[in-house]
Image: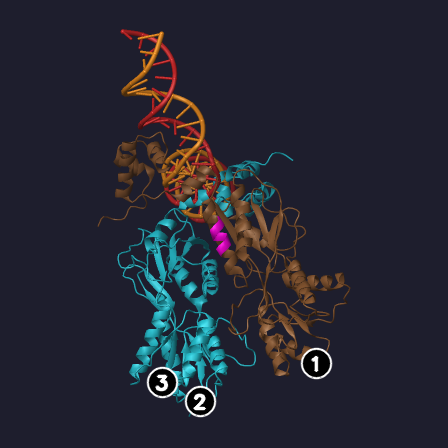
Chain colours: A brown, B cyan, C orange, D red
Amino acid sequence: MAAVKKSVSVKDVARLAGVSEQTVSRTVHDSPSVRPETKERVRAAMRELGYRPNFAGRSLRRGKFKTVGVAMFNITGTGNLDRMEGFAAAADKHGYAITLTKVDGHPYTLESASSRMSALPVDGMVVIMNRMPADFGTFEPLPGMQTVLVTMLEHPLCSTVDNDQFDCSRQVVEYLLGRGHKTVHFISCPERSLSGMRREEGWRETLRAHGIEPPRLVRGDWTAQSGYAAGQALAEDPTCTAIYASNDAMAYGCIRGLESCGKRVPEDVSVVGVDDSLGDIVPDRRLTTVRFDNKRVGMWAVDKIAGADGGASGVEHMLIPGVLVEGDTVRDLC
Amino acid sequence: MAAVKKSVSVKDVARLAGVSEQTVSRTVHDSPSVRPETKERVRAAMRELGYRPNFAGRSLRRGKFKTVGVAMFNITGTGNLDRMEGFAAAADKHGYAITLTKVDGHPYTLESASSRMSALPVDGMVVIMNRMPADFGTFEPLPGMQTVLVTMLEHPLCSTVDNDQFDCSRQVVEYLLGRGHKTVHFISCPERSLSGMRREEGWRETLRAHGIEPPRLVRGDWTAQSGYAAGQALAEDPTCTAIYASNDAMAYGCIRGLESCGKRVPEDVSVVGVDDSLGDIVPDRRLTTVRFDNKRVGMWAVDKIAGADGGASGVEHMLIPGVLVEGDTVRDLC
DNA sequence: TTGCACAATGGCAACGTTAACATTTGGGCG
DNA sequence: CGCCCAAATGTTAACGTTGCCATTGTGCAA
């Protein structure tokens, strides 16, 4: 075998095909102003040499990368996989690629995500926010780099998109009240979770909107373990007929906790979760929960960047509502 | 505000700082042969203009992208999130970025993944295989593009890495036999899953190695539902004292299925899952399962590419063993 | 004073691609 | 037969960066 040539360029193809470099370029882009038989000759040369267009040369010339950067502080997190599915699907649709970057969360700032991205070949960026970045209020995106934040908060300079956590709680609370429950108890999450806090607000405010003073909440930590403890605690409370847990794991834990105290679900107490993250893991008793469309969230974010393409588009804020999925863990008191 | 200049280049910085472009470049790379005070002047100019090095120019010059491409046929899949965590961590370590691409699975070939990547700015690529690609035997990676496959199969031209599914089954079966069980029943998965079939082989061969003829397996479909049905079926079988399910969802389903027939777990029947994918979802009864280190799998793949950097490294095959995590669903008969 | 080593900086070219413009060729029409 | 238009192809330059080599300046030993 001959030594591998570093890389095959248009120049090599042009030489072999006996045409100019420009004609090769035109052939690559299937321009109508190249004679079919010439095209075929060029294509044959490309095949023979194994020509692949060089991305760097192309981007340098065009000034565009056709790539969207995604910055994550935590890769592992509920819904991230579905979001990525959405990123990839939307990118595909626009002929874009996705560049994934893990950002160190110390400090937890948008600036650090932004500067991390600035040296990468991307035309725009998406930041997945789990907590409140220290510089949320003051952050401004890099010039020329369209930036979309995945969060419920609104930002003056960046478009934002996320699941509507407030509405999620509204749906759950109104669903339970509609089934005749006099109030809804709540198992919350750690306070630093933005989406969790928004769920908490939704619960509280929806109850108030119905003239009900929210009962004391039980603070959980996302684990089934904490849901179990919460269930045992709430089993003591005779006013508690309906529990809304901030996620599915706590909901399942809560059910077991209630049962360990002799309460039956849903006969004595109804339980609702959020996320639909565990599937029908208990096949004979499906959890009533709220399903989010994280794929759609991801698609929206990338669409915003890749769809704008040439023309800069304005700042927008999008909240995507979840869908309440009825299972077997809620009792209708009416 | 003045109209935004397209982009700031070394030339602009050089002009403002009153030095040559080369000195700017040297400053960017913190070369020791630039006087500190000159460096400071250049840095000030960079700050003032908001200079960011252009990736395309740089890659074009260097002939390297410092990026690893990841091709997935299915983004959503058990363990993918952890794998991505591994990709990102290893990439970070080497100063690389990750480019993520969804590959259409029609046809399901390595060639389609490869050609999809060929036009992207990547130095090497990782393909996550879930099934058997049609061209597995004949595939050859693009010249100059180091290719790593995430699969248990070995390939003559591509390095491969994956969890050791065979060893996983061996561990489970020997663990159960060691607890005094006379045989181990198995709930399998759909036949097109490579890793699932390997688990099945491991189960079968380990039993045979211990002189036990494997009982008839029950075919499942990954869902808790199918595990439930399997549990009910196996509850009839008096020889069945230990069940090994191909994943955790089926294991949980199986437990419920057994219980629905009056069998107690683990008193009457022991159950083991695989994946540790659901956490301690049943807080008062932890499932005995096998935990895989998918993050390590991801890191190995990217290390292989980014770590080689200059020197091409040879083809290697890596299997990473899982760890059996003892829970409360196995009874010791001894 | 000269010569020399070394530190600091500049000039030039090239990486691969393609937009813009230039040139050649063939054919239709007055 | 000459003119002009359109189709097909070629030439040039530029995108931003950096490796290589050339140049200038500075201090020190001979």
Chain that bears disc 3: B
- Whether discs 1 and 3 lie on one chain: the answer is no
Q: Residues within 10 Å of mark 3 (few under 14, many from 20)?
A: many
Q: Is residue B66 left or right of residue A3?
A: right
Instruction: Say what amino acid the circle numbered 2 marks.
Output: Asp
Rendered location of residue A78, percent (x, y):
55, 63
- Whether discs 2 and 1 lie on one chain: the answer is no
Q: Magenta span covers which residues?
A: A85-90
Which residue was labeled with disc 2? B332
Chain that bears disc 1: A
Rendered location of residue A19, percent (x, y):
29, 31
In the depicted structure, whether residue A175 falls above or below residue B269? above
Q: Measuring 40% from the left and 83% from the top, which residue is drawn there?
A: B175
Instruction: Say what amino acid the circle numbered 1 marks.
Output: Glu
Separation (CA) of disc 1 from disc 3: 45 Å
Q: Element type at marker 3?
A: loop
Q: Quadrant of the C terminus of chain A?
A: bottom right
The answer to whether residue A257 is seen in the rendering is yes
Which residue was labeled with disc 1? A236
Q: Is residue B71 left or right of residue A81?
A: left
Q: Main secondary structure of the magenta part?
A: helix
Instruction: Say what amino acid the circle numbered 3 marks.
Output: Thr
The answer to whether residue B29 is seen in the rendering is no
In front of the other: B252 or B94: B252
Which residue was labeled with disc 3? B183
In front of the other: B139 or A175: A175
Separation (CA) of disc 2 from disc 1: 36 Å
